[in-house]
Image: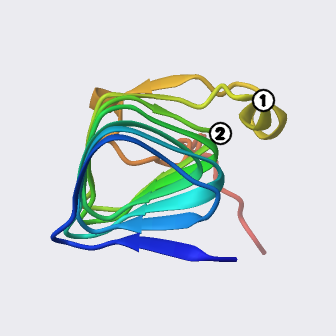
Amino acid sequence: MERMMIGKSTVIKGELTGEEDLTIEGTVEGRIELRNNTLTVGQHATIKAETSAKAILVIGTVTGNLTATDRIEIRETGKVEGDITAPKVAMADGAHFRGKIDMSAAKAEKTAPAAGQVHATELGSRPQSAPVAQTGARTNVA
């Protein structure tokens, strides 16, 4: 599969579409659409766009809504300000996110029937295991 790269010094304003995986290290403003491919927002990238792709990996900065048919991943250096829609979403410790997440796409319903919207304020807490009931009863062994 071919992979296209937009370098650090490149600035694109308008609509960007394609049929290959794309890594952006520069600046893109407008709209990005890669229906069947992966978009990687590199560490030096600044994206101000409505973005849709099969999968999106954010290592740099994105302002705008992200939609993926497979998954969205925000790494520890990634920053996203906008809403996310994808059946699978992963955020590393240290990732910055402001917006809401909608995981109610068809694929998410198959794997997690109770999937719904998670607001950014809820993302700060870590999952914890369910409390264990303690009865105080002791067993004596002879």
Residue carrying label 2: 87
Among the two numbered marks 2 and 1 on one chain, the one whose residue lies closer to the N terminus? 2
Helix, strand or loop for disc 2: loop
Helix, strand or loop for disc 1: helix
Residue carrying label 1: 106
Task: Look at the image and tell me in which quarter the N terminus lies.
Answer: bottom right
Foreground: 135 or 39? Answer: 39
Image coordinates for residue 29, horizontal then vertical, percent: 25, 41
Residue at x-position 78% and y-position 37%: 107
Foreground: 25 or 120? Answer: 25
Residue 140 against residue 53 in the figure, above or below: below
Foreground: 36 or 131? Answer: 36
Amino acid type, callout 2: Pro
Amino acid type, callout 1: Ala
Q: How many marks?
A: 2
The answer to whether marks 2 and 1 mark residues whose Cβ atoms lie closer than 8 Å is yes
Q: Is residue 140 left or right of residue 29?
A: right
Q: Is residue 122 left or right of residue 115?
A: left
Q: Residues within 10 Å of mark 1 (few under 14, many from 20)?
A: few
